[in-house]
Image (cartoon, helix red, strand yellow):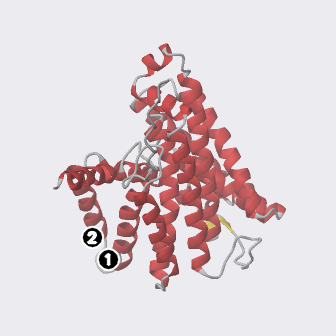
Amino acid sequence: MSIEPLAPPKKPKRLPVLPQRGKLSMFEIALFVACLVLIAVELSQNLRDVMVLTFLFAGLGLAWNIAGGYAGLISFGHAAFFGIGAYTSTILFVSAGLTPWIGLWCGGVLAAAAGALLALICARLRGPFFILSTLAAAEVVRIGALNWSSLTGGPEGLSILPVANVANMVFVSKTAYAVLMLAYVVFVYAITKALEGSRYGYYLFAVRDDEEAASAAGVNPLLVRTAAMGLSAFLTGIGGSLFAQYFLYLDPTFVISPELSFQFALLPAVGGLGTAIGPVLGSFLITPLSELLRSYLGNAAAGLHLVIYSAGLIVVMLYFPGGLAAALNRLGRGWKRKP
């Protein structure tokens, strides 16, 4: 009679300290707790505005990263999806009285349809040709918004009555907006983390890195990229609706502008392209820097804030070519090597 040795007890799984693909880390939890503390702290109205915009653009950077970072679809036309979401929810609210809590989902669905259509038409293009096609598509949407005055208000824009009401998604306190924007970030981040750890996420990475090899393995690149662009546009459209409810005014020259599309792409590039934490880190660095420099230096020395902002971006891109997320991982590996 043989006696089998007892299996050693399984060690409880610990959360990784630094962000990893498809896994929640202690760093991410600590960052979320820090955001909650920041919301609870008394800040000036100016700093509250910066915090709200930082959360909003973190979510928008995450949404762009699904298409640009995971699927390899570098898009400079995401402002079109942003504007479609913003105008859809606002028009439904102003004209039909539909609450923005429902209108933002309608705007997201319409933006997703536009994103999927754009991917079906243009995803076969490569490199700068695809980038230019997305830029042209956004310009078409912007011109349409400027000229369809009966629907969008044209160059004069579209306003939302500032009647504070939860049903209207209009609040007196900026703290409520900060909580709403943080919820948006958490929502998009959860989708991103689930996506990158799923089978479909690996399809995305395979298509991005080697389309021919992925196709030979049975992956449909067009279908994978179309779904990624649709999801990215859907989340961007929701962000556009939240933007409209915060500022209560839509100006097509800004809401659907190339500069806004560049901003969406810049956040993941600085924070770490193709990583979940990258767009968040990018927004936490770039958005406060941009807003505070504009606030404190914009009137005193016109243009100086742009010089400092650009110099800061150049330094980051030179010394952290892999983004802030890569620098964070290198720092973590350095700590582990210390005796």
Residue furthest top as drawn: 216
List x then y, in percent, for residue 56. Answer: 52, 62
> Which dot marks residue 304?
2
| Mark 2, secondary structure of its residue | helix
Residue at label 1?
297
Residue furthest right as drawn: 96
How packed mark 2 is, by other alpha carbons closer than 10 Å (few <14, some 14-19, many 20 or more), is some
List x then y, in percent, for residue 49. Answer: 50, 75
| Left or right: 289 in relation to 185 | left
Q: Which residue is at the front of the view, 324 or 328?
A: 328
Please state which amino acid type lies under the numbered disc 1: Leu
Q: Earlier in the sequence, mark 2 or mark 1?
A: 1
List x then y, in percent, for residue 184. Answer: 59, 60
Q: Is residue 293 visible?
A: yes
The residue lying at 70 percent from left, 45 percent from top is: 110
> Is 212 located above or below residue 282 in the figure?
above
Instruction: For the residues labelled 2 and 1, say whether their Cβ atoms are less than 8 Å apart.
Output: yes
| Left or right: 127 in relation to 256 | left
Q: Is residue 143 visible?
A: no
> Which dot marks residue 153?
none
> Is 300 located above or below residue 140 in the figure?
below
Question: How far apart in space, not on screen, are marks 2 and 1 (Cα)?
Answer: 7 Å
How packed mark 1 is, by other alpha carbons closer than 10 Å (few <14, some 14-19, many 20 or more), is some
Q: Which residue is at the front of the view, 133 or 22?
A: 22
Residue furthest front as drawn: 1
